[in-house]
Amino acid sequence: MGNKMFCWQCQETGGGKGCTICGVCGKKPEVAAMQDLLVYVTKGLGAVAARLRTEGKSVSQNINHRITQNLFVTITNANFDREAIIRAVEETLKVKSELLSQLGNASDLPEAARWSGCRNEFDAKAAEVGVQATKDEDIRSLRELIIYGLKGLAAYLKHANALLQDDEAIDAFIQSALAKTLDNSLDAAALTALALDTGKYGVQGMALLDKANTSAYGNPEITEVELGVRNRPGILISGHDLRDLEMLLEQSAGQGIDIYTHSEMLPAHYYPAFKKYPHFAGNYGNAWWKQKDEFEKFHGPILMTTNCVVPPAESYKGRLWTTGTVGVPDCRHIPGAYGEVKDFSGIIAQAKTCPPPEELETGKIVGGFAHEQVFAFADKVVAAVKSGAIRKFVVMAGCDGRMKSREYYAEFASKLPKDVVILTAGCAKYKYNKLPLGDIGGIPRVLDAGQCNDSYSLALIALKLKEVFGLDDINKLPLAFNIAWYEQKAVIVLLALLYLGVKNIHLGPTLPAFLSPNVAKVLVESFGIAGIGTVDDDIKLLIG
Ligand code: SF4
Ligand code: SF3
């Protein structure tokens, strides 16, 4: 091996192959090592929990949550705090040893399930258990595809859990899948089947989160969101956790400050429940990768509830706060376990001492086109398709990122024929949601369903259209998929779409480095997965 680290889980991985000296995201080798170890011990805990289940014993909610939180911690741009990750490893080893004592015979479990060690042994162990510990490139590729899908699924589950929604079947699946990534008897065919099964639970996980969000906050509705700023100090909240936003809005009401959303928190404005707060001011800035510049100009404190956080500049480090699975060394962390009310008084107090944000832009954008809202005007959409006013829909959901090659998506959106509608979700939309793309008979040409997890809404909309048009196959709809990916939530969305039978998905700006040539071949041959080409060629190919 000889590498100081090896990580290839995101689209921006070093040289398109793997980060080996330091992460392009800013992840240092010593943090990467503890993330590798956390994944390893979490696989071990999953294997022990899966065995307990096969023995007919119960697995507590605490264990379920520990596993999903650990996986979430290791997602790209979530946690850069080595100490916090070490504590997670220690806690995992502790609960694992308690569970092991409940098992009759554990000697046949994989080594990850039986291993224990103390802090001074962690680095040596981490060096043995990373991605490259699996020698066969196809097995390694499939194991990582599954693990990254599980990380994305775990993230979505964690948000549902925060709203007191659990689904034991999904946790049981995650645990058994983790165990299977340790099982050397499983061949490529078995692991390919497991990857597709992960997609099935991805759909279930996103459905659970959809239910959690809409039952807590109502169904998203068409909403205009302010892009400008007010003249009072503010707190900027980023990431995907709506429960954190709710608590922050409640605690900051009437305090002389405003709350602004950033990046993936923008869709919070679409929920009826948050509209009652007059200090919920608008959305500030763009996708995650511009945060260094934009956080500087915000002047007030920033709360990161999930990924994507970029290691901050010294100039605003003192204003960056984390909570949940996010961690940044030297930044303040707001604790709070499942079901607890977090205390945001510190960040609110800091906000009051700060100047108001600097204006980045003015105007409004519109969103809120989640399933119920789109179903409400389905007649109009169907009529527009039948009359030919809408020729096609293109799903352009997913992630944004810093690579220049992503300009492709802005160009693709602007060059699309005027009778094509974009369906989007996730932070990918920032490449085109502020372009003047107009509407078709009152239907905006960019329909934003929400966060990346709300890609579930796009799937429901597609299934609804299939039903309305009386089609037997989702692939017969006038619908193309041109998805931008960056981190592991996009991996679970992709696996979910494959499970739903969607074919010919274009994935860019590059295909994952973790797909070996043989695994990529299976995805191309069985599902028609393809990369992207030039904008003009792809418009011809996808729109005709
Ligand atoms: Fe590199 Fe991406 Fe891993 Fe960060 S998450 S170390 S950029 S592959
Ligand atoms: Fe964006 Fe990180 Fe993926 Fe939720 S905030 S989509 S990249």
Image (spheres, grey):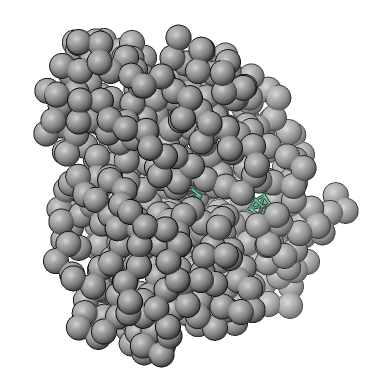
Q: Quadrant of the C terminus?
A: top left
Residue 323 visible, this angle:
no
Residue drawn at (57%, 47%) of the image: 401
- 16 shown above or below 120: above
Q: Nearer the viewer, residue 227 or 488?
A: 227
Residue drawn at (46%, 55%) of the image: 286
- 539 shown above or below 247: above
Q: Quadrant of residue 433?
A: top left
Q: Position of residue 318 (x, y in %)?
A: 54, 83
Q: Is 311 situated left or right of 162 in this image?
A: right
Q: Nearer the viewer, residue 246 or 336?
A: 246
Q: Nearer the viewer, residue 478 or 138?
A: 478
Q: Quadrant of residue 466?
A: top left
Q: Is 68 situated left or right of 386 in this image?
A: right
Residue drawn at (73%, 33%) of the image: 137
Q: Position of residue 130 (x, y in %)?
A: 71, 53
Residue 242 visible, this angle:
yes
Q: Is 118 situated left or right of 208 in this image?
A: right
Q: Quadrant of residue 75?
A: bottom right
Q: Position of residue 90 (x, y in %)?
A: 57, 74
